[in-house]
Image (cartoon, rainbow, N blue to C red):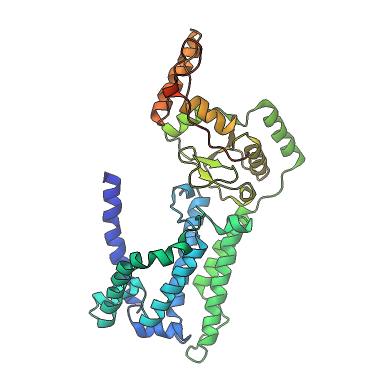
């Protein structure tokens, strides 16, 4: 393990202690409280969990909007609806039977409750039994997961609008919970709390920031001039240098279609479908580089982003083909011109850094068989 991984592992300990302490403080280590949620009698679980989701969502989105956080640095678990639906049924069934989830079960067990210890034992038993049942359960989880799937991309909406919708849903759910608890509280169920009003204000602000006016004729004309002058392009060697030097804010987006888990991506790139570009969340200070195979899709994505007012965006010149030729397998020039030699030495250094294979021409000008360029894994534009 490296030093950063040691620090990450150590940081999990105080975070876990704080999480368990808070769960115990709000009473979620008591199965009776969780059972009250399941029979729609006590909504403390809903308030704590939904409130935590909204708080984290608003904090992350506001940090990204202000440029304090790079969303690309966050790990987004893959989405596999079939496997996750099956897991939800199994998890929900155990949650209903034990009136404890894994987190609250650990809290209950640490508090000395026998039911908590039994639930934790069940978690370990289920972990041991799962490999035995995998031949039956496995096919449900065999679907290709969708990497980095997000609701704004799926709905084709700006992230701020989705954040506002989720916040409004949470506030409405809290009000409905108060309505169902009417008679046990003196507060009118329809009157929002200060935290609920504050969350709606913050979410509405994020929604307004995320909605940008359409491009004006002058902006469209400027976009056209950039395309003609190729000011929107970046060369493969320049992009490779930015990646190697860890250029701050660099975000690389692959807009090819039909990608799967075997498709080669430029290191650090994220796969985003063309129809998702309109709702792509972009933090201030990010520098975007788009690429596809032939350049068509990347150019279309570039225009969509420029019409949104995003100016710090480039297209990889000649796309993945140029990256493979110039970065992964550059060929030593046959001519002895200093400029060509210098360019090759730069490309050779980058190729070795990225695990590529520089090529040396033989007398016929063809690369030796052992250094032949790797096959290009292309899909579409």
Number of marks present in the image shown: 0
Residue at 63% in and 28% down? 231
**Picture layout, residue 63 above or below residue 357:** below
Residue in front for this viewpoint, 206 or 287: 287
Estimate the x, y position of residue 131 in percent, counting from the top left: 34, 64
Residue at the top extreme?
336
Residue at the left extreme?
112
Quadrant housing the C terminus: top right
Q: Is residue 206 visible?
A: no
Residue at the bottom extreme?
183
Left or right: 103 in relation to 179: left
**Picture layout, residue 176 above or below residue 131:** below
Residue at the right extreme?
217
Left or right: 84 in relation to 292: left
Estimate the x, y position of residue 274 in percent, counting from the top left: 63, 46
Residue in front for this viewpoint, 112 or 351: 351
Estimate the x, y position of residue 372 in percent, counting from the top left: 46, 24
Q: Is residue 233 visible?
A: yes
Left or right: 12 in relation to 262: left
**Picture layout, residue 146 above or below residue 134:** above
Residue in front for this viewpoint, 342 or 250: 342
Residue in front for this viewpoint, 241 or 178: 241
Residue at 69% in and 35% down? 223
Q: Quadrant of residue 345?
A: top left
């Amino acid at each position: 393990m490296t030093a950063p991984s040691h620090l990450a592992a150590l940081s999990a300990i105080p975070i876990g202690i704080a999480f368990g302490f808070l769960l115990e403080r709000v009473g979620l280590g008591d199965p009776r409280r969780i059972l009250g949620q399941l029979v729609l009698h006590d909504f403390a679980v809903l308030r704590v969990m939904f409130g935590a989701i909204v708080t984290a969502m608003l904090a992350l989105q506001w940090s990204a909007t202000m440029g304090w956080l790079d969303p690309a640095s966050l790990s987004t678990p893959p989405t596999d609806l079939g496997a996750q639906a099956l897991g939800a049924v199994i998890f929900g069934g155990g949650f209903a039977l034990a009136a404890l989830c894994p987190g609250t079960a650990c809290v209950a067990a640490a508090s000395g409750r026998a039911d908590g210890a039994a639930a934790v034992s069940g978690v370990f038993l289920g972990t041991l039994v799962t490999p035995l049942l995998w031949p039956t359960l496995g096919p449900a989880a065999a679907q290709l997961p969708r990497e980095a799937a997000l609701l704004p991309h799926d709905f084709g909406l700006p992230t701020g609008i989705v954040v506002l919708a989720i916040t409004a849903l949470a506030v409405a759910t809290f009000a409905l919970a108060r309505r169902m608890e009417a008679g046990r509280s003196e507060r009118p169920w329809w009157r929002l709390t200060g935290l609920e009003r504050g969350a709606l204000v913050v979410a509405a602000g994020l929604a307004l920031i995320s909605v940008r006016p359409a491009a004006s004729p002058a902006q469209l004309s400027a976009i056209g001039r950039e395309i003609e002058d190729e000011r929107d392009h970046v060369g493969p060697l320049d992009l490779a240098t930015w990646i190697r030097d860890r250029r701050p804010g660099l975000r690389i987006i692959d807009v090819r279609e039909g990608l799967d888990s075997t498709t080669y991506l430029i290191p650090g790139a994220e796969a985003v479908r063309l129809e998702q570009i309109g709702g792509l969340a972009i933090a201030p200070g990010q520098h975007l580089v788009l690429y596809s195979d032939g350049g068509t899709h990347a150019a279309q994505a570039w225009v969509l982003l420029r019409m949104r007012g995003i100016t710090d965006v480039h297209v990889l010149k000649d796309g993945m083909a140029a990256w493979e030729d110039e970065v992964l397998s550059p060929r030593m020039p046959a001519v002895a011109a200093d400029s060509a030699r210098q360019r090759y030495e730069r490309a050779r250094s980058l190729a070795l850094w990225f695990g590529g294979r520089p090529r040396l021409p033989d007398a016929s000008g063809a690369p030796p068989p052992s250094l032949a360029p790797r096959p290009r894994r292309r899909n579409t534009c």
